[in-house]
């Protein structure tokens, strides 16, 4: 594993923890984790690595909010 991929994995883990706290009372940890992973996949190659944390949090949060309003 390269240092960059380890750092990115840590960012994904931290965003998952943060969003689980934010949405935990309304969505399961599994939902949050799956949406964060999907958002990470969609951002791959689209942004500079330094922006991953912020962009991942924004995109996943938007998607989680949308799930709550649609569901």
Image: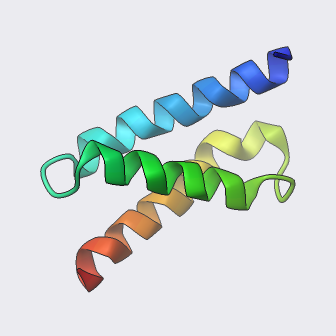
Q: Quadrant of residue 62?
A: bottom left
Way the structure is coloured? rainbow
Vertical arrangement, residue 62 with respect to residue 9, above or below: below
Residue at x-position 28% and y-position 84%: 70
Residue furthest to the bottom: 70
List x then y, in percent, for residue 56.
59, 50
Residue at x-position 85% and y-position 46%: 48
List x then y, in percent, for residue 61.
43, 59
The image quadrant where one finds the N terminus is top right
Would residue 4 appear left or right of 65 to someone viewing this image?
A: right
List x then y, in percent, for residue 59.
55, 62
Would residue 69 appear left or right of 60 to someone viewing this image?
A: left
Vertical arrangement, residue 64 with respect to residue 10, above or below: below
The image quadrant where one finds the C terminus is bottom left
Give the total number of marks visible in the rendering.
0
List x then y, in percent, for residue 46.
83, 59
Residue at x-position 43% and y-position 39%: 16
Residue at x-position 59% and y-position 58%: 39
């Amino acid at each position: 594993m390269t240092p960059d991929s380890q750092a990115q994995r840590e960012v994904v883990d931290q965003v998952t923890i943060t969003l689980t706290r934010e949405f935990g009372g309304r969505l399961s940890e599994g939902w949050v984790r799956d949406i964060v992973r999907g958002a990470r996949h969609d951002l791959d190659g689209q942004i500079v690595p330094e922006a991953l944390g912020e962009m991942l949090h924004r995109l996943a949060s938007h998607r989680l909010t949308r799930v709550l309003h649609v569901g």
